[in-house]
Image (tube, grey):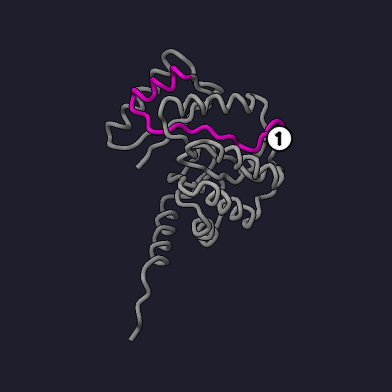
Amino acid sequence: DRFCMGAAWRSAPEGKRFDAVLDMVRGVRALGMEACVTLGMLNESQARRLVEAGLTAYNHNLDTGPEFYGEIITTRTYQDRLETLKAVRGAGLEMCCGGIIGMGESVKDRAGMLQTLASFDPHPESVPINALVAVEGTPLAGRAQIDLLDLVRMIATTRIVMPKSRVRLSAGRSSLSQEAQILCLVAGANSIFYGEKLLTTNNAGVNEDDALFAALAAREAPATAAS
């Protein structure tokens, strides 16, 4: 099991707040779980200290392809993100890195993001595929929900270009039916984020996920002949 922790920082701060993160990582590892954090931009020294504390993985998404990136994000550059990922890899951490679809990007933009991710050697161990959650009061609040088949195609393509990565069906899952989630899992996703919140947005509930896993187990069970 892996426990993921996030902070709403542009970049990881030094001092007491970073020391508190290190303590939390140690606490999670003491419970026998893997630990993952997402803290924004990270330098090499911070990455090394996280490793020393026992961190397993670092999440830092590209969000979209390089050509569309500037239309969505202004707080840091695409190169800033790549530099953080370089520090993560250099420290020996597992990389959790994916993006969001449904923000108005083109199919070419989605392909550009996957091309960048697939250029890492080795590939990211985890690739979250997020469907935009159009939160009221944000610039993308009016966006329609991503078409299910677009999500399935994105997951299937991710699986093809990064065959050994854990492709995570991530944000937006709470709006999908059980059948739609199973379709995504059959198409290539082999991981989810478990828990009722993903940072500030709702996630599928524990009871719903238990039912999803039961349905998947029933689907994969060998057929038996009725007498």
Closer to the camera, 222 or 18? 222
Closer to the camera, 174 or 181? 181
- Report the span colored magenta: 44-71
Residue that protrudes farthest toward the top in the picture: 15
Q: Residue at x 65, y 40 (%)?
A: 112
Q: Amino acid at mark 1?
A: Glu
Residue 47 in magenta stretch: yes
Residue 110 coordinates in the image, percent (x, y): 65, 44
Q: Residue at x 72, y 45 (%)?
A: 106
Residue 157 coordinates in the image, percent (x, y): 58, 51
Closer to the camera, 114 or 103? 114
Does 84 sit above or below residue 136? above
Where is mark 1, residue-wise?
67
- When asked about the image quadrant of residue 50, the answer is top left
Q: Residue at x 50, y 36 (%)?
A: 121
- Badge 1 marks a residue whose secondary structure is helix
Residue 45 in magenta stretch: yes
- When asked about the image quadrant of residue 72, the answer is top right
